[in-house]
Image (cartoon, rainbow, N blue to C red):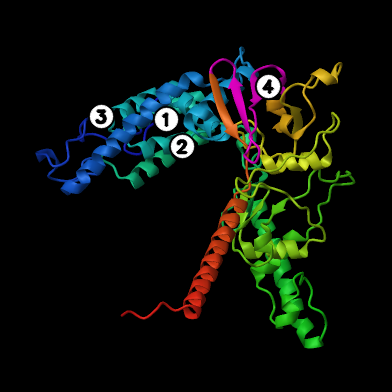
């Protein structure tokens, strides 16, 4: 590709004439060379020198981390790619890192890029002189680059001195990437047009969710302007409705009519999006396979507890929100759990095809694919699977269609299990305790996974038992006081 040169004429990433070599070991904090502090060797008080040393060690650990993980990467575009073997390796790495498959996949890709595409910068990371945060930023900002472009980034970044500030490093990287991207055509799927999508971000613990719309800036701004114009028109109509005594428009909660105050633009925009009809151009949309499950402890419903509810088995929602949603629902489904352990009580065995009630129970027990560290939701494309295989030709001697022999898997892991790559085995269950499943990935990894459990029930039960014990103690104290008044001790002589 040739040298990439900045405005000074020096190769991109070097400091220019008269500034000495770019690569050099930083002086130790507190030494004579650090009398004039630099970002790489700041003058630090004694209690922060250990922190600085730890940052150097963090760089070394990150480099060692990537070097160890790189061999586990499977190139999906390689001629010898084996999807099942790659999935087995991915699950093994996820278990080793104690993270989800998605996170493990990203880390493996980063490790592969670091070792094969950024070897010179990785060498500086190994030495500890290159900050771990800088290296991480390079990885995040260059995911869309070609190997040749990554090589240019590596050549430049490996010469950048660590005496620059972090802001200066960001500026250098941005300039370099801008220059590279202007020289080559961006793949279609990475252009702003190719990245159009809608994302549901992970829900927060306070009951807040987020839907993110991503696309080319002109389209997003046009959408925002249309939404803003519509909201302003509705808000003006609400004001006119107050003047004429009419019912205000777009008031799903009735708060505008009740308070006599127009809704905020933000709230109107939210209501407009929530009530928007999806134009599918005549395509028939099937009914959802599962209902949206909101689990609420009975004491929370009665107002005697502030124990939060859960949405889809994993997302906590405040007690007040859970009560409001339950009050708006026309039908409740009772779910029985063990009062001490919170284990979901099994339903009876039936035929080969699991009943709808059994599928709902399995979703309560595992709201995501039963394979450890898989985060695919069971609310969508999940498949019911017999842990011990069902024998269609000889049902009496095969795995039964019962809760203890069933779980929900995503299609990919269902196929991997069918091919023998994953081997689950249900361990003997103890009444009243959550069940356990042993998962073996080939002959390399084995792990025991406990079923999900109702976390609210044991807490509520313990609170009730504690309240009952205190009530009994108060009754006993009153009984003893009454007994002493009726039978006072004899006076002393």
Which residue is identified by label 3?
A: 23
Count residues near mark 1 (Cα–Cα under 10 Å), then give few for <14, some for 14-19, many for 20+: many
Point out the tag, 1 or 2, that comes first from the N-terminus.
Answer: 1
Query: Residue 171 sits in which quadrant?
Result: top left
Q: Residue at x 77, y 23 (%)?
A: 399
The residues tagged by marks 1 and 3 sit, at their Cα atoms, a distance apart of 16 Å
Which residue is identified by label 4?
A: 416
Point out the tag, 2 or 3, that comes first from the N-terminus.
Answer: 3
Q: Residue at x 39, y 30 (%)?
A: 4
**Taking 328 as reference, is 45 above or below it?**
above
Point out the tag, 4 or 2, that comes first from the N-terminus.
Answer: 2
Closer to the eye: label 4 or 1 = 4
Point out the tag, 4 or 1, that comes first from the N-terminus.
Answer: 1
Contact between marks 1 and 3 (CB within 8 A): the answer is no
The residues tagged by marks 4 and 1 sit, at their Cα atoms, a distance apart of 38 Å
Closer to the eye: label 4 or 3 = 4
Closer to the eye: label 4 or 2 = 4
Query: Is residue 22 something one can see in this rendering?
Result: yes
**Taking 160 as reference, is 456 above or below it?**
below
Point out the tag, 4 or 3, that comes first from the N-terminus.
Answer: 3
Count residues near mark 4 (Cα–Cα under 10 Å), then give few for <14, some for 14-19, many for 20+: some
Chain part drawn in magenta: 415-444
Q: Residue at x 48, y 28 (%)?
A: 96
**Taking 276 as reference, is 16 above or below it?**
above
Kindly identify which numbered label has been placed on residue 177. 2
Closer to the eye: label 2 or 3 = 3
In the structure shown, which secondary structural element does the residue marked by tag 4 occupy? helix
In the structure shown, which secondary structural element does the residue marked by tag 3 occupy? loop
**In the image, is residue 482 part of the stretch drawn in magenta?**
no
């Amino acid at each position: 590709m040739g040298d990439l040169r900045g405005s000074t004429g020096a190769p991109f990433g070097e400091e220019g004439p008269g500034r000495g070599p770019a690569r050099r070991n930083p002086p130790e904090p507190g030494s004579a060379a650090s009398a004039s502090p630099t970002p790489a060797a700041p003058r630090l008080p004694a209690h922060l020198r250990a922190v600085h040393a730890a940052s150097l060690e963090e760089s070394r650990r990150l480099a060692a981390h990537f070097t160890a993980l790189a061999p586990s990467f499977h190139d999906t575009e390689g001629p010898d790619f084996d999807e099942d073997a790659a999935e087995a390796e991915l699950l093994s790495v996820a278990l080793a890192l104690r993270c989800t498959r998605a996170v493990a996949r990203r880390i493996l890709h980063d490790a592969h890029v670091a070792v094969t595409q950024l070897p010179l910068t990785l060498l500086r990371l190994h030495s500890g002189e290159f900050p771990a945060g800088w290296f991480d930023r390079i990885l995040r900002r260059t995911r869309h680059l070609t190997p040749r472009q990554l090589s240019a980034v590596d050549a430049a970044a490996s010469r950048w001195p660590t005496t620059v500030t972090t802001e200066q490093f960001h500026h250098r990287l941005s300039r370099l990437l801008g220059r590279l991207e202007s020289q080559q055509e961006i793949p279609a799927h990475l252009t702003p047009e190719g990245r159009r999508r809608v994302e549901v971000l992970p829900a927060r613990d306070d009951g807040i969710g987020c839907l993110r719309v991503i696309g080319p800036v002109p389209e997003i701004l046009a959408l925002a302007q249309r939404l803003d114009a519509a909201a302003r028109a509705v808000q003006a109509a609400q004001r006119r409705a107050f003047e004429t005594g009419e019912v205000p428009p777009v008031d799903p909660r009735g708060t505008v009519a009740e308070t006599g105050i127009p809704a905020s633009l933000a709230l109107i925009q939210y209501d407009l999006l929530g009530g928007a009809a999806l134009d599918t151009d005549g395509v028939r949309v099937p009914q959802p396979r599962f209902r949206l499950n909101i689990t609420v402890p009975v004491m929370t419903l009665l107002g005697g507890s502030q124990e939060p509810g859960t949405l889809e088995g994993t997302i906590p929602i405040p007690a007040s929100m859970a009560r409001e949603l339950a009050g708006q629902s026309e039908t409740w489904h009772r779910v029985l759990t063990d009062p001490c352990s919170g284990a979901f009580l099994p339903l009876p065995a039936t035929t080969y095809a699991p009943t709808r009630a059994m599928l709902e129970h399995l979703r309560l027990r595992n709201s995501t694919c039963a394979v450890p560290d898989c985060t695919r939701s069971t609310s969508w494309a999940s498949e019911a699977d017999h842990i011990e295989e069902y024998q269609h030709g000889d049902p009496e001697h095969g795995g039964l269609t019962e809760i203890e022999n069933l779980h929900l898997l995503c299609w990919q892991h269902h196929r991997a299990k069918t091919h023998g790559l994953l081997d689950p085995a249900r361990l003997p269950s103890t009444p009243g305790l959550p069940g356990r499943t042993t998962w073996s990935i080939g002959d390399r990894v084995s792990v025991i996974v406990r079923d999900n459990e109702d976390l609210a029930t044991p807490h509520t039960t313990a609170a009730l038992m504690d309240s009952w014990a205190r009530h009994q103690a108060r009754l006993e104290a009153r009984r003893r006081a009454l007994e002493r008044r009726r039978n006072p001790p004899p006076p002393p002589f």
